[in-house]
Every structure is written in C-alpha cells, then in structure tokens.
Amino acid sequence: MGEAVEIINPISSIENKSENLSWYEEEIDEDLKWSFAINGVLAKVTSEHQDIVLLDTKRFGKVLILDGKMQSAEHDEFIYHECLIHPALLCHPCPKSLFIMGGGEGSTVREALKHKSIDKVVMCDIDQEVVDFCRKYLTVNKDAFASKKLDLVINDAKAELEAREEKYDIIVGDLADPVEGGPCYQLYTKSFYEQSLKPKLSENGIFVTQAGPAGLYTHKEVFSAIYNTIKHVFKYVIAYTAHVPSYADTWGWIMASDQPLFINPKEMDQRIEERIEGELLYLNGASFLSSSTLNKNLYQSLMNETHIYTEENAKFIPGHGLHSYA
C-alpha cells in the first residue's frame, strides 16, 4: 500500500494540544497518503530480502510493516486472513492438505488449522527473519507455530513447490504485494501459475491468493491484472473483496480451480458450523456473497482487463523494495 515508513511528529494539519503525537505515514498513491498515530516502534530489522518493522499504534494495536507497506494490524487482521483462507477450504469437498506461499506471521496457518479435516499445512516463507520476528512479537499465533500439523519451510515457494512430489488440496498465496525490487512479484506470473503451481493441485484442488488493493482508485494497480492472468490458467475464477480499516482501502482476493466453485450462503454457513472448530469473527455465507458480488465499476474493469502478468511485463504497486528506513 505504500512507500517507506515515515514517522512524523506531528502532522501539521492535525491539532492536538494534549499530547505530542508521532505518526506513521504510508503513500497510497502519488497524491494520497494514509497516516495514523503510533506509540512507538517496537522492533526494526533489515533482512536479506526485505525491511521488517513492528509498530505499536493507538488505533490498530501492533502493526507489521514489510518493505514500507502495511501487512497486517492486530485489531483487524482477522478480516484479511478469514477471507484468504476460509472460502477456498469451504468450497472444497474435504480439504486435507494445504500449501501456503508466504504467511510468515502465522495468521494464515492459524485460520487453516480451524478446519477439522486438515491433516497437514506446509508454510513456505522465503525469509527466516520474518518468521522469527513474528514468532517473537506476534504471540497470538504461538499455538499455530507449535502445531504438529505444520511443516514450516524456509525457501523460495517456486523452488519448494517444484521440488515436492505431493499434491495439495489447497494452495494459498499469502505473499507480499508485487513491489519492484521485492522478493515476490515473480510468484504472480502466468508462467508460475501454469508451470509450477497448477500441477501441484489435487483433482479438486483450489488456488487462492491475496491480490492487492481493490478500491475504486487502486484496483487497476495489480488486482485486475492478477485476475486476468489467473483467468488464463484456470477454468473457474472468483474475485472477491472486503474493506480492511487498517489498509484504508478495499482489499482483493482471487480463488480459482478447474472445478466449479459455487457455494450458496446457507450451505457455507452449514459447512462453517460442521467443519470449523473455533469462532470466525468476520466471514459467514452472507458476507461472502456480498464480497463476491462486485460493484459495476470493478466488474467492468476486470472484464475489460487485457494485461497478463509476466516477469518481463510485470505491474507493481507503490513501494520501495529493499532499502533502509530513515
């Protein structure tokens, strides 16, 4: 969602006489920034692959920043992670195995393990330091990291998928956004989906990925192109969106399979009741129906999109790749 982390003290357009606030600022576009008050920087590391920052914010709790872009916030990350995981698993007749690309903070694993049928979750993140950082500071996911069902691998997701012989019922793209100079943009390409990912899905397999901002002004950055790219690889494709307050935008996900994906709200609610242990805070049948019913503007943009994502013809959202924070 933006470029580098800036701590501003204070923002001139906001009057606050009672306290001297510090602010996090993120560039959404050239003429648009998003800012919120912070208590301080809890930790900051630069790994081989990316910059990692954890902020303590007044509104959203702990906030994880990678390469100058908001990844998740303690108080509303459940929206993103429930939307990423549960629709695909609920559309599958009986998911048992799951491969997560990325997911270093552990929240995606946490949500997947709520499904009683899941026997094995492989989480493959390229950055050991992100995983160690999140295990240390985001303790809400400690049970997920400790699960015997989790196979945690530090590797490039493409190389790991290609090296494994087994196939998976669900493959999840919980990757950082495609940022120029960042570690993940190659994993949004048609060749990757077609040659590396799709062959690793089981017969009824489903692929789901986060696909970047999907707002009125931001969906053309990468969301529509990722949708169009996946549409050229899979027979059935569903795009869906939800507003995530800490992102200051609507976010998008794309689910795809060579088997039909339709599930009605009543059936989804029934499967949630039967299949899931623990509580969902956001997703139910009605909310998913709403999320997958796109507004006219967004629907037409997706239908008219012609860009296919390749390494040579990639699209990027605002961000800075690997640089040091000021």
Image: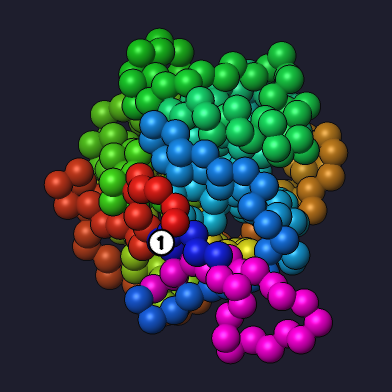
Indicate the amino acid at tag 1.
Glu
Judge whether residue 123 is colored magenta: no
Q: What range of the chain is rendered magenta?
A: 8-29
Query: In which quadrant will I find the C terminus?
Result: bottom left
- Relative to 45, say whether 73 is above or below: below
Is residue 283 visible in the rendered image? The answer is no
The image shows residue 275 at horizontal and vertical percentages of 77, 34
- Relative to 65, say whether 28 is above or below: below
Q: Closest to the observer: 163 or 228? A: 163
The image shows residue 159 at horizontal and vertical percentages of 33, 21
Name the residue that disc number 1 marks: 3
Left or right side of 124 for 63:
right
Q: Residue at x 71, y 75 (%)?
A: 20
Q: Residue at x 64, y 52 (%)?
A: 41
Q: Closest to the observer: 80 or 4? A: 4
The image shows residue 202 at horizontal and vertical percentages of 47, 23
Left or right side of 4 for 264:
right
Q: Closest to the observer: 300 or 133? A: 133
Q: Residue at x 55, y 26 (%)?
A: 123
The image shows residue 88 at horizontal and vertical percentages of 58, 42
Judge whether residue 9 is colored magenta: yes
